[in-house]
Image (cartoon, rainbow, N blue to C red):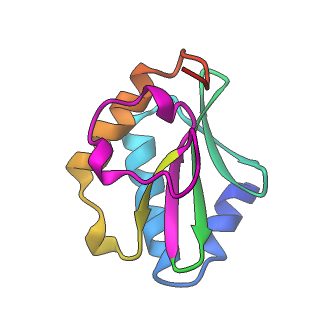
Amino acid sequence: MNPAEDYILQQSEPHRSILLHLQSVIERTVPDAVLKYKYKIPFYYVNGRRYCYLNQSKDYVDLGFWNAAHLTVNLEYMTTAGRKMMKSLRYKSLDEIDNTILIEILQDACSVGDKKFWK
């Protein structure tokens, strides 16, 4: 089994369900995304470049975006949580996930995938 998938399946509920849902939406929205296991968490790559990561931390799941400095859509739903460049969506339950917002952010992240990490 892919270590990234194993990471997802080893999480307790509700985190496992959140991670599985995010995985499904990411892979439907960005069919070229490749799931890898980097830095001890699942990371998606598009065209060989880091795209986003999934991380269960404390009591939430973090969907972080690598080129977040360039994102322009739905920023009010994202958190920096003390980080300078990374932004993420945080979910504590499946009910918190708005697929429309999630898909718009995923598409925005794809559109800036060729830009550098720093602005």
Position of 115 compared to 26: left or right? right
Q: Is residue 16 magenta?
A: no
Which residue is rendered at x = 51% and y = 60% of the image? 62
Q: Which residues are magenta?
A: 60-86
Task: Report the number of discs.
Answer: 0
Above or below, comparing residue 4 to residue 119 in the picture = below
Spot occupied by residue 44 in the image (x, y as percentages of width and height) = 60, 41
Tell me which corner region of the image, top left, top right, bottom left or bottom right, holds residue 21: bottom left
Which residue is rendered at x = 28% and y = 48% of the image? 76
Q: Is residue 75 magenta?
A: yes
The quarter of the rendered structure image containing the N terminus is bottom right
Can see residue 32?
yes
Above or below, comparing residue 60 to residue 71 in the picture = below
Tell me which corner region of the image, top left, top right, bottom left or bottom right, holds residue 119: top right
Spot occupied by residue 61 in the image (x, y as percentages of width and height) = 50, 67
**In this orientation, which residue lies closer to the viewer: 93 or 69?**
69
Which residue is rendered at x = 49% and y = 51% of the image? 80
* View extreme (bottom): residue: 13
Spot occupied by residue 94 in the image (x, y as percentages of width and height) = 33, 72
Spot occupied by residue 68 in the image (x, y as percentages of width and height) = 49, 35
Can see residue 1?
no
**In this orientation, which residue lies closer to the viewer: 110 or 29?**
110
Which residue is rendered at x = 45% and y = 43% of the image? 27
Above or below, comparing residue 10 to residue 84 in the picture = below
